Amino acid sequence: MAIFKKLITALRGSVNEAGEAIIDAQALRILDQEIRDADVELKQAKESLASILAQQKLADKEVEKIQVEITEYENYAIKALESNNEKLALEVAEKLSVLEKKYTVNKEQATYFADNVKNLRQIILQTEINIRNLKQQVDIVKATESVQKAQSAIAQRYGNSTTKLQTALDSLERIKKRQEKTSATIEAKKELLGSETQDSLDRKLEEAGIKSSNQSAEAILTRLKEKQIN
């Protein structure tokens, strides 16, 4: 039974490792998709913010409008009292009571919208920063992944097979030596060709009697005597 349990545990470990390997292989793709999803959600959040901001502005306008009405009817009430018309002043006071209740409700709404706009703006700003940082990190991870793949390829081809690398270097050295030998042969042929051409020209001059092959002893002696006199 103990052996059977160990086998089950080992199988579970293998399954987990295989699952993690699949997830790791798709990690960058998953990150890219999550970033795209976050961008979509951020766009929706901005649209919601715009809607709430519009409601806040409407609520603020309504509050301003009611405040103007309250000020207006307060002046009416004061004038009614100044005219000793308490009945009319009471009616105006009732109107003011309604306006003040309306003002309170709209003021609370405007404050509620303003608070939500402030909070949403902070959340959106922080989300934008997080997404930008995440994109930068993904770019770095992708670049590192590419470099590591290149390094792995080089290590797999050459690092684990020094014999192949040495064979390639030996072949390269043989090619260089062969090229040097070929260049030297070409230069030697050029020199030989030039020498043969000069020899051929000298023979032609000698055959035509224009150039003598060797100076006579008498000519050499005469030349030496001339040098001695000079």
Image (tube, rainbow, N blue to C red):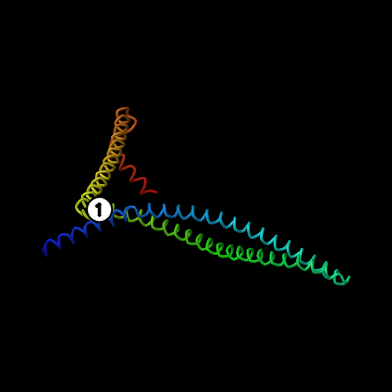
77 over 150 or under it: above or below: below
What residue is shown at x 31% (from left), y 36% (from top)? 194
In percent of width and height, residue 135 lies at 45, 57
Q: Amino acid at mark 1?
A: Gln
Quadrant of image for the N terminus: bottom left
In this view, which residue lies farthest toward the right?
83
In percent of width and height, residue 158 lies at 24, 53
In percent of width and height, residue 95 lies at 76, 65
**To which residue does mark 1 refer?**
156
Helix, strand, or loop for circle 1? Answer: helix
Count of residue discs: 1
Q: Nearer the viewer, residue 117 or 89?
A: 89
Q: Nearer the viewer, residue 127 or 93?
A: 93
In percent of width and height, residue 183 lies at 29, 42
Q: Nearer the viewer, residue 16 or 98?
A: 98
User: In the figure, is residue 131 to the left or right of 196?
Assistant: right
In this view, which residue lies farthest toward the front?
87
Q: Dot 1, how many residues are within 10 Å of its Cα: few (below 14), some (14-19), or many (20+)?
A: few
What residue is shown at x 89% (from left), y 70% (from top)? 83
